[in-house]
């Protein structure tokens, strides 16, 4: 089964529009049942970003071609790709760097923003490289990279990145955040 869209109805709940291709498993089989569930279950966007600090403690931010504010390097996790593999791939594609992931720093749920749906952001601690080493920037996405102290982060980064980095500085051991703030449990 494939999710083809959403049928919006006035005064009634929306309905998912599903289709079955000729080579899909029959709905009456286990494989068909799993395929129908997989098509109907919600999909959530996953993003993987790298937290890279140089020896002076500065954070690497990317000046992007498609938005005004700077952001941590990384990007959307492709289907069937792990978040850790995605951050390595993104650093290779966008900066020309073979990154080494040290571990997961935090998971941050991002609420819907502007026209974007919500997402889950995986922030990885990535080993720094020589800040003087030349990078090969992907010109369609990265205009420049900058090693930023706290002041420059506050001046140029996205609001979400500023909140996240502040939260990581305040509570570095906490592993889960929502909208950049440490999750303290449900009320």
Image (cartoon, rainbow, N blue to C red):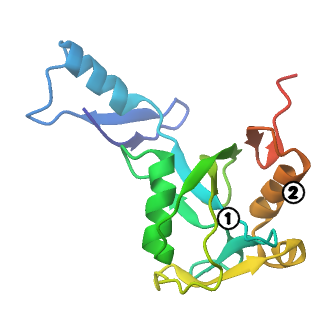
- Identify the secondary structure beneath mark 1: loop
Separation of marks 2 and 1 at Cα, in angstroms: 15 Å
Please determine whether, in this image, residue 119 is positioned above or below residue 89: above
Look at the image and tell me in which quarter the N terminus lies: top left
Up-down: is 168 above or below 59? above
Residue 178 x/y as whole percent = 76, 42
Q: Residue tagged by mark 2?
A: 166
Q: Residues within 10 Å of mark 1 (few under 14, many from 20)?
A: many
User: Is 23 positioned to the left or the right of 123 in the image?
Assistant: left
Point out residue 29 in the picture as x, y percentages from the top left corner: 18, 13
Q: In which quadrant of the rendered image does the C terminus lie?
A: top right
Residue at left offset 42%, top offset 32%? 15
Q: Nearer the viewer, residue 113 or 142?
A: 142
Task: Find the residue positioned furthest to the left.
Answer: 22
Label 2 crowd bin: few (<14), some (14–19), many (20+), radius 10 Å:
some
* Number of the label disc, if any, that sits on residue 107: none
From the viewer's perspective, is 56 left or right of 135?
right
Residue occupied by mark 1: 52
Q: Helix, strand or loop at disc 2?
A: helix
């Amino acid at each position: 089964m494939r999710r083809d869209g959403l049928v919006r109805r006035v005064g009634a709940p929306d309905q998912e529009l599903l289709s079955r291709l000729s080579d899909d498993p029959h709905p009456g089989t286990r494989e068909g049942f799993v395929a129908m569930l997989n098509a109907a279950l919600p999909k959530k966007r996953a993003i993987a970003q790298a937290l890279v600090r140089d020896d002076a403690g500065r954070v690497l931010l990317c000046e992007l071609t498609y938005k005004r504010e700077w952001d941590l390097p990384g990007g959307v996790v492709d289907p069937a790709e792990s978040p850790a593999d995605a951050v390595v791939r993104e650093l290779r594609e966008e900066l020309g760097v073979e990154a080494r992931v040290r571990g997961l720093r935090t998971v941050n749920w991002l609420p819907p923003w502007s026209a974007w749906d919500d997402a889950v952001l995986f922030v990885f601690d990535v080993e720094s490289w020589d800040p003087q080493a030349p990078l090969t920037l992907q010109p369609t996405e990265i205009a420049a990279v900058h090693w930023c102290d706290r002041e420059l982060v506050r001046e140029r980064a996205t609001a979400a990145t500023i909140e996240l980095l502040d939260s990581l500085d305040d509570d570095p051991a906490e592993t889960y955040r929502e909208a950049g703030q440490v999750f303290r449990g449900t009320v």
